[in-house]
Image: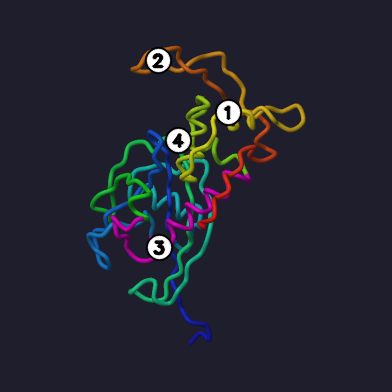
C-alpha cells in the first residue's frame, strides 16, 4: 500500500472570445452525474500517456468539436478536497483565447455546447457544475491582467482588424470604456523602431450605416515588449 493518498487529475478549459463587443465563454451541458444536465467548462480526466496540454486540447475537441487555438495555457490548479463529489480530484485550469470559436458540436459526455455571455455566468444567471464558477472568474481576471502585460489582445482579433475592434477587446474583458483618442495614441508609442499596429493598406467592408469603411491593420513587432494599453484605475467609492 502506498504511503501517499491516491488522487485523479482533470483539465478544464476556459475558452474566451469577443463577439459584437461581448465577452463570451464556451460551456457544455453535462450528460452524466455528477451534475448531470448542468452547464460546465469543457474538460475531463487526463490520460496517463498524454501531457496536460494534449489532454486540454483533446477534451475541448471531443466535447465541443472546437480545435484548440494557438493561445492555450495553464493558469491555475484547483484541489479543494470537496470540489468533486467523486473523490479527491485535482484539476488544472487552461485559458484559451480566440478570435473565432468556429463550429460547435457537442460530443462524448456533453448533451449540448454553446457560447454564453461571461457577465451572465458570473452574475449567477447560469449555475456551473463543480467549482467552475470560481475557475471562470479566475480565468477572466488572468485575461484582464495579461491584456496589460502581453500581446493577448492580438489573440482575440483575427490577423487583420480595425482599431475599433482592438479597442473593443480591452473594453469587453475589462468591463470599462476607454477613451478612443488616448487608446490610439498609446498604440503609436511603440518602443525602439517597432510598431504595435501596421496598416495593411486595405479597408473593412462598409457597414450598414454607410460612411467610409475603417482601415485594416496587422499586429506589429512592438507587442513583444508588452501591451501599450493600461487598465483604467477604478474610482474608490466615497
Q: Nearer the viewer, mark 4 or mark 3?
A: 4
Q: Residue at label 1?
A: 181
Q: Earlier in the sequence, mark 1 or mark 2?
A: 1
Q: Residue at label 4?
A: 99
Q: Nearer the viewer, mark 1 or mark 2?
A: 1
Left or right of 159 on screen, residue 81: left
Q: Relative to 5, does residue 143 appear above or below in the rendering? A: above
Residue found 39% across the figure and 76% down from its top:
82
Q: Is residue 144 magenta?
A: yes
Q: Position of residue 161 (x, y in %)?
A: 50, 26
Q: Counting other residues with Cα less than 10 Å from the Cα at mark 1, is it few (<14), some (14-19), or many (20 or more)? A: few
Q: Nearer the viewer, mark 4 or mark 1?
A: 1
Residue found 27% across the figure and 55% down from its top:
29
Q: Residue at label 3?
A: 45
Q: Earlier in the sequence, mark 4 or mark 1?
A: 4
Q: In terms of secondary structure, what is the magenta stretch mainly?
A: helix
Q: Residue at label 2?
A: 206
Residue found 32% across the figure and 37% down from its top:
103
Q: Counting other residues with Cα less than 10 Å from the Cα at mark 3, is it few (<14), some (14-19), or many (20 or more)? A: some
Whole-number angstrom distance, CA of label 4 to CA of label 1: 24 Å
Whole-number angstrom distance, CA of label 4 to CA of label 3: 27 Å
Please tell me which residue lies in front, 107 or 162: 162
Please tell me which residue lies in front, 178 or 82: 178
Q: Which residues are magenta?
A: 123-149
Q: How many marks?
A: 4
Q: Secondary structure at mark 1?
A: helix
Q: Position of residue 34 (x, y in %)?
A: 27, 68
Whether tag 4 and tag 3 are in contact, CB under 8 A, the answer is no
Q: Nearer the viewer, mark 4 or mark 2?
A: 2
Amino acid at each position: 500500500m502506498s504511503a501517499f493518498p491516491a488522487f485523479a487529475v482533470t483539465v478544464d478549459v476556459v475558452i474566451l472570445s469577443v463577439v459584437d463587443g461581448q465577452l463570451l465563454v464556451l460551456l457544455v451541458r453535462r450528460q452524466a452525474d455528477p451534475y448531470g444536465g448542468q452547464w460546465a467548462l469543457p474538460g475531463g480526466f487526463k490520460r496517463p500517456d498524454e501531457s496536460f496540454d494534449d489532454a486540454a486540447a483533446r477534451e475541448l475537441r471531443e466535447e465541443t468539436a472546437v480545435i484548440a487555438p494557438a493561445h492555450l495555457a495553464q493558469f491555475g490548479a484547483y484541489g479543494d478536497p470537496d470540489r468533486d463529489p467523486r473523490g479527491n480530484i485535482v484539476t488544472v485550469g487552461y485559458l484559451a483565447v480566440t478570435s473565432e470559436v468556429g463550429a460547435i458540436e457537442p460530443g462524448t459526455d456533453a448533451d449540448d455546447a454553446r457560447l454564453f455571455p461571461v457577465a451572465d455566468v458570473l452574475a449567477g444567471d447560469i449555475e456551473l457544475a463543480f467549482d467552475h464558477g470560481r475557475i471562470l472568474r479566475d480565468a477572466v481576471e488572468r485575461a484582464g491582467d495579461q491584456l496589460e502585460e502581453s500581446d493577448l489582445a492580438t489573440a482575440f482579433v483575427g490577423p487583420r482588424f480595425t482599431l475599433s475592434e482592438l479597442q473593443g477587446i480591452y473594453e469587453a474583458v475589462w468591463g470599462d470604456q476607454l477613451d478612443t483618442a488616448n487608446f490610439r495614441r498609446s498604440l503609436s508609442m511603440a518602443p525602439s523602431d517597432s510598431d504595435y499596429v501596421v496598416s495593411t493598406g486595405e479597408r473593412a467592408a462598409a457597414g450598414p450605416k454607410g460612411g467610409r469603411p475603417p482601415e485594416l491593420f496587422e499586429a506589429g513587432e512592438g507587442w513583444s515588449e508588452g501591451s501599450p494599453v493600461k487598465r483604467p484605475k477604478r474610482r474608490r467609492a466615497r
